[in-house]
Image (spheres, helix red, strand yellow):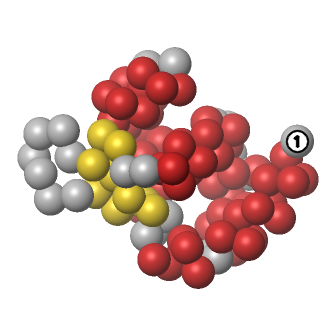
Amino acid sequence: MEKALWYLLAGTRGGQNRVRLIRSLSDRPRNANQLADQLDLDYNTVRHHLDMLIDHDVVERGEADYGALYFLTDGFERHRDEFERITEHLE
């Protein structure tokens, strides 16, 4: 997970937006439209970042087809300290 987090947050463009998405989902589950509104990002941009986070087991999608909520995975939660350490290097 640590390597995946370094890649997602520091190794690719869009890392700052992924940090913002993770922090928002830490507050509570949200759907892609809510995330786009809250973070003032384009909906398609949010979906792209969510897909990347899903592919690396950081975020999981709820079961609803329309307006599905996104949640942080248990695997991510076990590595939250690594996330915080990585984000300290980004600021």
Mark 1, secondary structure of its residue? loop
89 sits left or right of 15 in the view: right
7 sits left or right of 87 in the view: left
Image quadrant in which you'd find residue 7: bottom right
Q: Above or below — where is 75 with respect to 88?
A: below
In x, y percent, where is residue 6? 73, 62
Which of the two residues, 81 or 13, is positioned nearer the viewer here? 81
Image quadrant in which you'd find residue 74: bottom left
Q: Above or below — where is 22 with respect to 91?
A: below
Residue positioned most to the front: 27
Quarter containing the N terminus: bottom right
In x, y percent, where is residue 8? 63, 54
Q: How many labels does the image show?
A: 1
Residue 17 appears anywhere in the view: yes
34 sits left or right of 20 in the view: left
Residue positioned most to the left: 65
Q: Above or below — where is 40 with respect to 17?
A: above
In x, y percent, where is residue 26? 53, 54
**Crowdedness near tag 1: few (<14), some (14–19) or many (≥20) residues, C-alpha within 10 Å:** few
Residue positioned 73% across, 72% down in the render: 81
Quarter containing the C terminus: top right
86 sits left or right of 59 in the view: right
In x, y percent, where is residue 37? 42, 21
Residue positioned 83% across, 64% down in the render: 85
Residue 3 appears anywhere in the view: no
- Which residue corresponds to mark 1? 91
Q: Above or below — where is 52 with respect to 58?
A: above
Q: Which amino acid does label 1 sit on?
A: Glu
Residue positioned 89% across, 53% down in the render: 89
